[in-house]
Structures are given as structure tokens and as C-alpha cells.
Image: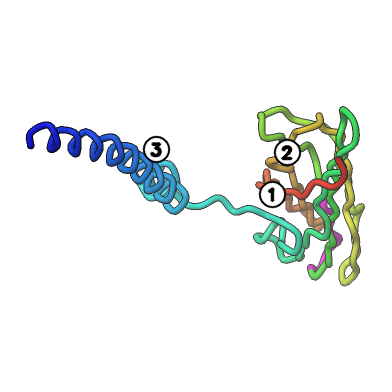
Amino acid sequence: MKRRTLVRLLIGLGIGIPILVEGLTFLGLIERRLFGEDGRSDDGMTATPTRRVGVGDELLPGTPQPETVRELLIIAAGDTWQFTMSVAVENTGEVPYELRLGEVTLSDGTTVQGGGSTGQIPSGEQGTAAAQWSIPSGSTPRTVEVIGTAYGESPTVTEEDVTLSKVPVQGG
């Protein structure tokens, strides 16, 4: 009877320990997904989620002009991929407005120069900023530098590194 109990105990431990480890790992992943690394920032306060921008989203919500992302796409071909972004801008302000797309920071931290601009858009009119960046194959863009300038008596500049949502890859 002792031998039978020992075998049952060993079998129970052999099955139970991996199930316990997998369960704890799963709960840890769920917790990180919901609350970030530990749910707190460096100063002990609850972390605020990063705003991620995708197609249909506004780039600079702090400006009166809506800058709506129309296209985010990576064309995969060869050793260099093409990251394309276009933004529609409606100048609802009272002075000319310009939107510029600058350098892109990739997920590995490297930056790629380039960009595009709407040029000055008169009040009440619309424009488009379109840009392409050549990025190494397998790379993903993480942020793009966005600069909005309202040209009045004293120009107002809004500059932000905007975090991008997942960018679709076409081709391959």
C-alpha cells in the first residue's frame, strides 16, 4: 500500500507542477496585457496607456485642424521595404496651416530620415501629407515625428513623436 501511495504522489506531482507553472505564466501574461509591466510607472503612479495611432485616427488631437491618417502600409520586397503614410488635413483654423511628417523610429530604436508635407493650407481648405521611408526588411515603424504649424502673427508649432499602431505588411 505504501508503494502504491508513493507512485500516486509522484504521478500527481509530475502532472501538477507543470500545470501550476503554466497557469501562473498565463496569469502573468494576462496581468501584463491589462496593466502593463507591473501596472505602475517609475514614480509609483498608475501607468497611462500609450496612445497608438492607426488608419482613421487623428495625429495631433491638440490642434484645431483634424489630421486624419488615411494610409499606413509597408510594401515588403527585397532587402529594403517601403513604409508609406498619408494624412488628410482639413484647415478649420483661421490662419494657414502646415503638417509635416518627419523621421521614423523603428522598433529597434534606429531612425530613418525622410518625410513629407502638406505645404501651407489656406483657411477652410484641405491638403494631404504623404511620405515614404525605406526601412530594412523585417523592420517595423514604432513612431513618426509629426509637426503642425499654424502661421499667424506668431506661428504656433505643435511637435510630437506619434506612436503608431500595428502597420500592415503587403507583399513578401
Circle 2 crowding by C-alpha within 10 Å: few under 14, some 14–19, many from 20: many
In front of the other: 164 or 23: 23
Q: Say left or right for 7 vs 170.
A: left
* Disc 2 and disc 1 in contact, CB within 8 angstroms: yes
Q: Which residue is mark 2?
A: 140
Q: CA distance from mark 2 to mark 1?
A: 8 Å
Magenta span: 93-100
Which quadrant would the C terminus be assigned to in this image? top right
- Picture coordinates of residue 112, whole percent (x, y): 79, 31
Seen in the picture, residue 23 relative to 121 is either above or below; the reply is above
Quarter residue 57 falls in? bottom right
User: Circle 3 sits in a helix, a strand or a loop, which is it?
Assistant: loop
User: Residue 38: x percent and y percent?
Assistant: 38, 43
Give residue 42's mark: 3
The residue singled out by tag 1 in the image is 166
Q: In which quadrant of the rendered view does residue 63 lie?
A: bottom right
Kindly indicate whether the residue at mark 1 contacts the one at mark 3 (C-beta within 8 angstroms).
no
Q: Is residue 94 magenta?
A: yes
Name which residue lies at 71% across and 34% down. 106
Dot 3 or dot 1: first in sequence order is 3
Between discs 2 and 1, the one toward the N terminus: 2
- Compared with 148, 105 (above or below) is above
Is residue 56 or residue 138 the one in the foreground?
138
Instruction: Estimate the spatial distance between the alpha carbons at disc 3 and disc 1, rounded to whole Å.
Output: 26 Å
Q: Position of residue 163 (x, y in %)?
A: 66, 47
Instruction: Report the amino acid beneath label 2.
Output: Thr
Looking at the image, the residue that sits furthest to the left is 2
